[in-house]
Amino acid sequence: MRITFRAGFLICLFSAAVTISVWSYLPEAGEYQIVSIDPSSWLVTARSENGNTLAFHMHPSVFRGRCFQANLRGVTEGGRFSMVGPPRERFDRLQAKAVTRQGAPADEKRTRGRNQRPSTRGMQRYCVTDVDAERQTAHAESQSGEKIRFKIDVSSFRGYRFQVPSVVDLARGERFSLTTPNSVPVRCCTLEERLRQR
């Protein structure tokens, strides 16, 4: 009985050790950081913690109907503002254009994103009603009925982080989903026009 218990205990310890070693081998379970976005084609290039790269088109129409938090008090036309998206926001039906798997250079330094969600106190909720991909502008409306038009600076998304499930199996042309924690505010917008509240 004691031998059986000891053998079972050792098997459990071995299984736990194997699981931990597998987890430590996987690089952030598919976490990527945006390296660049081509504003003409909206081609996103991102890199994982272990140096893998992923390129995919993310047409701005996917933001139609999406909501964000922003504080526009005191922001005049031509002024920049930050936005914070909802936590664990998911985007579906994206298509991989290029997938490259390689080890990261030993001397490359990467900065970690914030783990805590930023405070949205004093911010108002806006939802995107329309997107003009060519002009890189969007229209949004707040809960109070205020309508705004703003320009999107795609370069501001450089360094933005997201997760991709089953990244090991991802191949060119394959559709996938990504999830972003929205753990940092993005100073990506310039207010072009503010309409009066209804």
Image (cartoon, rainbow, N blue to C red):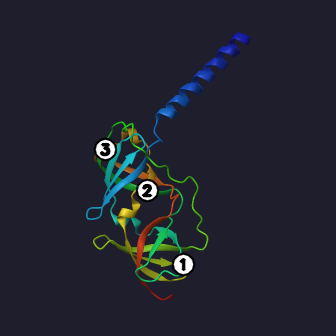
In the rendered structure, which amino acid carries the disc numbered 3? Val
Q: In the drawing, what numbered circle is on residue 80?
A: none
Within 10 Å of disc 3 (Cα), the crowding (few <14, some 14-19, many 20+) is: some
Q: In the drawing, what numbered circle is on residue 143?
A: 1
- Secondary structure category for the residue under label 2: loop
- Of pointers 1 and 2, the one earlier in the residue sequence: 1
Q: Residue at x 43, y 43 (%)?
A: 49
For the view shown, which residue lies furthest in the front direction?
A: 107
Give the quarter of the image for residue 3.
top right
Give percent across and percent down for residue 179: 46, 53
Give percent across and percent down for residue 65: 44, 69
In the rendered structure, which amino acid carries the disc numbered 2? Tyr
Within 10 Å of disc 2 (Cα), the crowding (few <14, some 14-19, many 20+) is: many
Q: In the drawing, what numbered circle is on residue 99?
A: 3
- Of pointers 3 and 1, the one earlier in the residue sequence: 3
Circle 2/circle 3 CB separation < 8 Å: no
